[in-house]
Image (cartoon, rainbow, N blue to C red):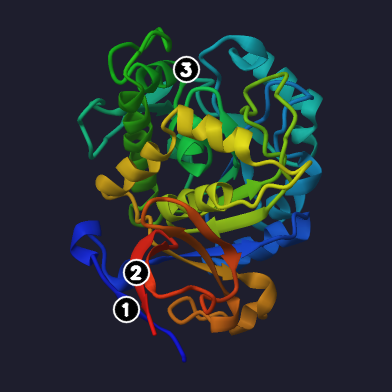
């Protein structure tokens, strides 16, 4: 008997059926597929375009390589942007950061701007629980459009790093990074904050500040996560642990919360096998309470955790209707109510028995 989906518990989740954000997916990780998934968003980069990446702490770090991003750079005429680090290392000063960038080869494919090279500026935060403002590189104000291009992976402090971290910690100046890490108590010391959730919530608030800045009239921002080299360690680690699981793909959205949530679902619903083990990354995220960043970002209104997952390889770009994605292109990450994985990136819900599930971040009931 054909199954139907009935939406329930919308009040509890603060969502409606129309609140789901589109997240586009491809399992191909190439420079061509990066361009294709950017184009699937249907938002054209205009004006002075910033491409925010991590330039990586060393050649051994798992940063996105220049040869992978060059086609997107050329298409959008983007400037690669970064800010200096707060923890020392070889990117803590503008001079050493520029040298590292040259060693990585980024300035061979684009102009590169260290946004806090000439100072910093404050932009307003909507959520003032921990932060009174967001301290960002002063050059941020030179840009009309941002492509937040993040390498999704683990992180020693945040549990994971995706687009939310890339535009909170990543766009903050050195003192701004300290301000976020310390949950608003210091602009000189990023260490010593024992309240993990305050740090995660500060990241969400700072990410919202950058998002809101680029949602002013005449500006815009889009988000892309690349799920490759899925180490438990961030690209800020010069000697990261080797990835224990296989690559997954590239995901993109105009909603950073839905995007990071879809990536988390792919990690936590991953079917591990010998030699392809997601458990270390799952444990890293859980131990750092990393999912709270996404939960809090939704709570303060940055985006929604409910999403449509759309595989761009199943239909031509000219056929995309963002409001009515083709059924054959939809993918599903399904958990039971008690958090057990049920389906991972599935093409159909037909195998589900009747019951209540969390499907793509939203509580739903399956009935026959």
Dot 3: within a 10 Å radius of its alpha carbon, few (fewer than 14), some, or many (20 or more) residues? many
* Residue 7 at least partly seen: yes
Contact? badges 2 and 1 (CB < 8 Å)? yes
In the picture of the structure, the residue carrying the numbered disc 1 is 6
Left or right side of 307 for 68: right
Direction bottom: furthest residue: 1
Label 3, label 2: how far apart the Cα atoms are: 43 Å
Of the numbered discs 3 and 2, the one sitting upstream in the chain is: 3
Tell me which residue sits at (72%, 34%) in the image: 243
Q: Is residue 183 above or below residue 109?
A: above
Tell me which residue sits at (38%, 32%) in the image: 203
Dot 2: within a 10 Å radius of its alpha carbon, few (fewer than 14), some, or many (20 or more) residues? some
Please state which of the two labelled residues, at mark 3 or mark 1, is closer to the viewer.
1
Front residue of this view, candidates 271 and 46: 271
Q: Secondary structure at mark 3?
A: helix
In the picture of the structure, the residue carrying the numbered disc 2 is 364
Dot 1: within a 10 Å radius of its alpha carbon, few (fewer than 14), some, or many (20 or more) residues? few
Q: Is residue 262 above or below residue 6?
A: above
Front residue of this view, candidates 365 and 235: 365
Q: Residue 325 location in percent, x, y? A: 51, 79
Q: Residue 165 location in percent, x, y? A: 48, 35
In the picture of the structure, the residue carrying the numbered disc 3 is 174
Tell me which residue sits at (67%, 80%) in the image: 316
Front residue of this view, candidates 81 and 244: 244
Q: Residue 82 location in percent, x, y? A: 57, 30
Q: Secondary structure at mark 1?
A: strand
């Amino acid at each position: 008997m054909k199954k139907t989906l009935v939406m329930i518990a919308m009040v509890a989740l603060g969502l409606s059926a129309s609140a789901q954000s589109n997240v586009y997916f491809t399992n191909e990780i190439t420079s061509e597929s990066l361009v294709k998934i950017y184009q699937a968003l249907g938002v054209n980069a205009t004006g002075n375009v910033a491409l925010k990446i991590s330039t990586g702490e060393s050649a051994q770090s798992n940063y996105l390589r220049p040869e992978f991003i060059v086609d997107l750079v050329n298409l959008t005429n983007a400037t690669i942007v970064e800010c200096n680090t707060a923890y020392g290392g070889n990117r803590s000063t503008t001079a050493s950061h520029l040298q590292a960038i040259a060693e990585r080869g980024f300035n061979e494919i684009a102009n590169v701007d260290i946004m806090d090279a000439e100072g910093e500026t404050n932009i307003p935060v909507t959520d003032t629980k921990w932060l009174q403002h967001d301290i960002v590189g002063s050059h941020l104000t030179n840009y009309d459009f941002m492509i937040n291009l993040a390498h999704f992976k683990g992180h020693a402090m945040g549990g994971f790093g995706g687009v939310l971290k890339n535009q909170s910690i990543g766009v903050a100046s050195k003192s701004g990074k300290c301000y976020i890490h310390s949950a608003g108590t210091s602009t000189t010391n990023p260490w010593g904050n024992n309240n993990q959730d305050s740090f995660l919530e500060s990241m969400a608030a700072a990410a919202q500040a950058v998002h809101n800045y680029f949602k002013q009239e005449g500006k815009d921002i889009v988000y892309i996560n690349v799920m490759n080299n899925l180490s438990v360690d961030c690209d800020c680690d010069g000697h990261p642990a080797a990835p224990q699981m296989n690559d997954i793909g590239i995901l993109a959205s105009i909603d950073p919360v839905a995007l990071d949530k879809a990536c988390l679902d792919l990690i936590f619903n991953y079917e591990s096998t010998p030699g392809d083990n997601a458990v270390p990354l799952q444990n890293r995220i859980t131990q750092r309470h990393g999912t709270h960043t996404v939960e809090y970002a939704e709570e303060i209104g940055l985006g929604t955790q409910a999403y449509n997952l759309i595989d761009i390889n199943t239909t031509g770009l000219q056929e995309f209707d963002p409001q009515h994605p083709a059924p054959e292109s939809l993918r599903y990450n399904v958990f039971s109510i008690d958090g057990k994985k049920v389906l991972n990136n599935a093409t159909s819900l037909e195998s589900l028995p009747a019951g209540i599930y969390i499907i793509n971040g939203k509580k739903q009931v399956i009935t026959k």
